[in-house]
Image (cartoon, grey):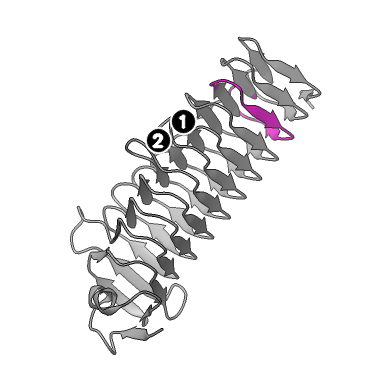
Amino acid sequence: MAIIRVPQDRDTVQLGVDAANPGDIVLVDNGSYKESVIVSKNSIRIVAKEKYGVILESNAVNENAIKLDNTYNVEIFGFIIQNSHRSIWVYRGGYHRIIGNIFQNHNADGIIFEDSTGNFIYQNIIRHNFSVGVLLGWSNPGSTSNWLVENLINDNGGHGVEIWTDIATGNAIINNNIFGNQGEGIFAKGQNTLLYGNYVEHNTSNGVKLLYGNNSIAVNNGIKANLGDGIDISSNQNIAISNLVKKNYGTGIQISGDENIVQGNVIINNKRGNIENNCNNNIFGNETGNL
């Protein structure tokens, strides 16, 4: 393993990446870097020497700051990435670790995963982007088996999190704080999606929308004060259990799909009612009312 220091050993982040071999660390010293970095190597780490001490912006506003180009097992840690088209475009490949960064003020999405699998997105701040905060998908067959954990996703111009295609499978959205976005908090079209322990509040549409894809599970989420419904289930064979759905401006849980299970939720003080069931679903053991 070698440590390649930027700018001491290589002048730019791109030159540091170009010099790296699998297992190497590109260690970026504090400062501002204006470049569009393309990573096409496997198993390297790109690390800010001091967390939030490195600011990265793309060369032009229509370029992404970083593109992970059909590569595997890359780590990106500790950067502020801003004022670009997107912070990171993950194109195919997968099993990357994107940890402890700030992605802000981009003119498209905060971060996008296109046909990529097995990525771990952890403890990032994703805010004030023009469109979606985190976009999983964008083309068929979609991105699968990604883990989005303990991120702060707020005040983006589109949805907080969007799973773009209904054949994206096995994504997990866990313990994130998703608020103030100009769309759905979580817009999930994929199948077998896990939504666990998220706080989804003050978004301008529904807190959570499950559309097209089936067999998703929403458990132990706090879904409050969204301008649409708390949870909108428009697909089949999903489970919503033990969620707190409170003070949303639409219906607490709105269901237009079939064979869903809604059990053990606290659904209270929602402006247009607490549960609206338009199809054949199993609804039992929920606490509802206006307290």
Within 10 angstroms of label 2, few (less than 14), some, or many (20 or more) residues? many
Tags 1 and 2 in contact by the CB under 8 Å rule?
yes
Q: Is residue 274 left or right of residue 70?
A: right
Amino acid under disc 1:
Lys
**Relative to 69, does residue 113 appear above or below in the rendering?**
above
Q: Residue at x 60, y 19 (%)?
A: 254
Q: Residue at x 47, y 42 (%)?
A: 161
Q: 160 or 289, which lies in front? A: 160
Q: Going by the picture, which residue comes out furthest to the bottom? A: 8
Q: Which residue is mark 2?
A: 164
Q: Secondary structure at mark 1?
A: loop
Q: Which mark is residue 189?
A: 1
Quarter of the image where the N terminus is located: bottom left
Quarter of the image where the C terminus is located: top right
| Percent x, y of residue 7 | 28, 85
Within 10 angstroms of label 1, few (less than 14), some, or many (20 or more) residues? many
**Relative to 163, does residue 66 appear above or below in the rendering?**
below
Total number of numbered labels?
Answer: 2
* Magenta segment includes 90: no
Q: Quadrant of residue 266?
A: top right
Q: Residue at x 49, y 65 (%)?
A: 100
| Percent x, y of residue 284 | 78, 20
Q: Residues in magenta?
A: 234-252
